Image (cartoon, helix red, strand yellow):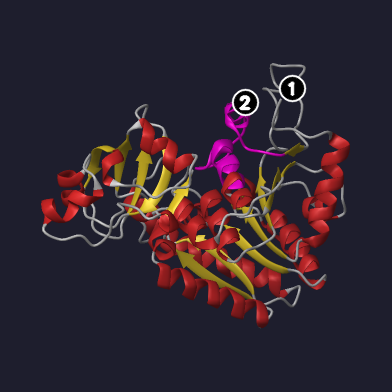
Amino acid sequence: MTFQVSKERGMALRQELLAKAKRVVVKVGSAVLTKADGLNLEVMASLAHDLCDLMREGREVVLVSSGAVAAGRKSLGLGTRALVMREKQAAAALGQGCLMRQYEDIFGRQEQLVGQLLLTHDDLANRDRYLNIRNTLFTMFDWQILPIINENDTVSVKELRFGDNDTLGAMTTNMIEADLFVCLTDVDGLYSGNPASDPSARLLNTVAQVNDEVLAMAGHVAGALGTGGMRSKIMAARMVSARGGSSCICHGRQPGTLKRLFAGEPVGTFFLPQEEKMQSRKHWIAYTLRPKGFLVLDDGAARAVVGGGKSLLPSGILETRGTFRIGDPVHCLDRNEEALAAGLVNYSSDDIKKIQGLRSALIKETLGFMDSEEIIHRDNLVVL
């Protein structure tokens, strides 16, 4: 298995990284926070105690918390029936207040102030808002306020949603350049197989790289993992790793999990950072922005972009898909539909369709103008 390191080496690396982790994002899902009759106050109290301990040690901490819809469902007496989108949004509108009221009470017993941020994907995709949110979080750190972040379920539609709080947690981690992302869920971590049916299945201690082999293991995990599932947690770990951070997936219902993790015990599955850290702006292009369209490249252009670090020229484009404007994000695909790179285009989709396959020298003759020789400059291009 190419993604692994030995347990001894893995434990040494995780202890070294945990000791250096001065800024930490902890995500807790509905599967941990709720029970059949509403919020699990015992779990919330235990979590608050551990987070306050981390802050007393001098760490800066952010909590990404689900639970608003579940809290609203309980207050409204909606039972366990499936809710349509408008019902979920209405339940979240009520439940978010209930959730924060409980957090304020529980953290208040620890004499810890908390503040709420409700975000949509569009907030982070807009560069100005992204930076404003980042500055708000840094100010809350300065004022010793614990930020509690959740998706703004009351206004989110498909185009604005993160999809799950694992993604929101990873994006938050990278936005503030946190050292560690901890994902608290209702399972022990990532297993090599299904422990219910495979006697040889074992909990993975340390993962050095999230590759296809690791992603394939996501289907082995049973449990009520909410909207995200294990795959989204692994993808979140990969996002954090690319930016130079560490991640850990571990059981959130067991008291003292965070304390045990930072004490160096072999808790959960730990994901190591990539050795080469992706620049902040390029990470934003690759992992935060959603593509407005796609460019299919020929073999030569694919090699130049992926292996040669070159800009994308019109001559290497076989097909343009979608409708987009200058400056919009797109993904570059090879002939097999595999995503190769993400980037910001210098021309609209209508103009690219007219010049695809042509040499750059023919751009002005074809369009009547030439803003750039490149469709995507290498400074705005990120290999995926």
Q: Are there few (<14), some (14-19), or many (20+) residues within 10 Å of tag 1?
A: some
Front-most of 105 and 26?
26
Dot 1 and dot 2 residues touching (CB under 8 Å): yes
Residue that lies at the very extreme toward the bottom in this rendered image: 143
Locate the N terminus by quadrant: top right
**Is residue 293 in view from this perspective?**
yes
Q: Is residue 69 magenta?
A: no
Q: Position of residue 105 (x, y in %)?
A: 66, 71
Which of marks 2 and 1 precedes in the sequence? 1
Q: Is residue 214 magenta?
A: yes
Front-most of 23 and 77?
23
Q: Position of residue 143 (x, y in %)?
A: 66, 83
Q: Amino acid at mark 1?
A: Ala
Instruction: From the viewer's perspective, tell me whether residue 252 is left or right of residue 156.
Output: right
- Which region is colored magenta? 208-237
Q: Secondary structure at mark 1?
A: loop
Q: CA distance from mark 1 to mark 2?
A: 9 Å
What mark, if any, has residue 201 been given in the picture? 1
Q: Amino acid at mark 2?
A: His
Q: Are there few (<14), some (14-19), or many (20+) residues within 10 Å of tag 2?
A: some
Instruction: From the viewer's perspective, tell me whether residue 253 is left or right of residue 76.
Output: right
Tell me if residue 50 comes above or below residue 354 in the rendering: below
Q: Secondary structure at mark 2?
A: helix
Q: Position of residue 247 (x, y in %)?
A: 68, 49
Instruction: From the viewer's perspective, tell me whether residue 76 is left or right of residue 344.
Output: right
Q: Quadrant of residue 125?
A: bottom left
Q: Residue at x 75, y 58 (%)?
A: 46
The residue that disc 2 covers is 220
Q: Residue at x 59, y 43 (%)?
A: 233
Tell me if residue 181 comes above or below residue 7 in the rendering: below
**Is residue 36 in view from this perspective?**
no
What mark, if any, has residue 188 been given in the picture? none
